[in-house]
């Protein structure tokens, strides 16, 4: 009995390296900020999960665009992220003043390898609401949550500002600057 031909690992690795840019090309160009100090980012807003039908899932995606080998250390924290929700005419939606009982995670500095991308959730689940509402919620903390009306089109945008670290031995790997995220549509709850 003959065995199936095996593809050498070197050939498979070369295919992954050279083909992956073509597989990701459309996704890579959608909604990214301009690179600042060799880092670019974007917001990704996905519909709620069936198990949590009102809270939209919000992700921050960062990519190291550095031209030389090395890592980027990103000192992310929720207080460095400023978001806004606007309607199709650019009018800001008022922040919700509903009761809030959630907690925010503590973020450790993250290392982003050369050419690497990381996507992580930044939404929370502490905003008080009525279960019978057919609206979606963007929950980013007690002073940054919005109840999205069931009618009309709404968008999220924002900035991430991390000041230059004053640690005495700051490495050129520590990222600092301001990324401005293009607006991204907020999905409707069905």
Image (cartoon, grey):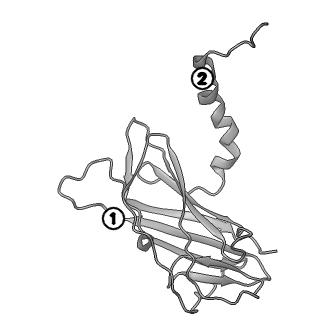
Horizontal side of 114 relative to 172 (left or right) equals right
Residue at the (23%, 62%) spot, across then down: 166
Q: Is disc 2 placed on a helix, strand or loop?
A: helix
Q: Name the residue tied to disc 2.
A: 14
**Rendered position, 108 above or below 85:** above
**Rendered position, 6 above or below 54:** above
Of marks 2 and 1, the one in the foreground:
2
**Farthest residue in the left direction?**
168
First reached walking from the N terminus: tag 2 or tag 1:
2
How far, Cα to Cα, is label 2 from label 1?
39 Å
Residue 92 appears in the picture as rendered: no
Residue at the (62%, 18%) spot, across then down: 11
In the image, residue 156 lies at what x, y percent?
A: 62, 72
Horizontal side of 128 relative to 148 (left or right) equals left
Q: Residues within 10 Å of mark 2 (few under 14, many from 20)?
A: few
Query: Residue 115 versus residue 126: which sits nearer the camera?
Result: 126
Residue 133, quarter of the rendered image = bottom right
In the image, residue 16 lies at what x, y percent?
A: 62, 29
Q: Which mark is residue 92?
A: none
Q: Which mark is residue 163?
A: 1
Horizontal side of 53 relative to 175 (left or right) equals right
Labelled pair 2, 1 in contact (Cβ < 8 Å):
no
Q: Is disc 1 placed on a helix, strand or loop?
A: loop
In the image, residue 3 lies at what x, y percent?
A: 74, 11
Residue at the (69%, 90%) spot, across then down: 130
Query: Residue 2 versus residue 144: which sits nearer the camera?
Result: 2
Q: In which quadrant will I find the N terminus?
A: top right
Query: Residue 61 versus residue 89: which sits nearer the camera?
Result: 61
Q: In which quadrant will I find the C terminus?
A: bottom right
Q: Residues within 10 Å of mark 1 (few under 14, many from 20)?
A: few
**Farthest residue in the top direction?**
1
In the image, residue 111 lies at what x, y percent?
A: 40, 49
């Amino acid at each position: 009995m003959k065995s199936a031909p095996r593809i050498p690992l070197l050939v498979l690795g070369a295919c992954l390296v050279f083909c992956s840019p073509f597989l990701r090309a459309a996704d890579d160009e959608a909604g990214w900020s301009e690179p600042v100090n060799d880092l670019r980012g974007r917001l990704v807003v996905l519909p709620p999960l069936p198990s949590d039908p009102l809270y939209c899932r919000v992700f921050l995606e960062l990519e190291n665009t550095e031209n030389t080998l090395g890592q980027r250390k990103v000192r992310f924290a929720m207080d460095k992220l400023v978001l806004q929700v606007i309607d199709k005419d650019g009018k800001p939606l008022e922040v919700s003043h509903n009761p809030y009982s959630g907690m925010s995670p503590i973020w450790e500095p993250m290392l982003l390898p050369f050419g690497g991308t990381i996507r992580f959730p930044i939404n929370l689940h502490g905003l008080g609401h009525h279960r019978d509402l057919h609206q979606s919620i963007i929950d980013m903390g007690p002073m940054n949550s919005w109840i999205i009306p069931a009618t009309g089109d709404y968008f999220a945008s924002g900035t991430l500002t991390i000041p230059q670290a004053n640690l005495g031995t700051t490495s050129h790997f520590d990222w600092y600057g301001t990324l401005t995220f293009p607006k991204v549509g907020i999905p409707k709850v069905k």
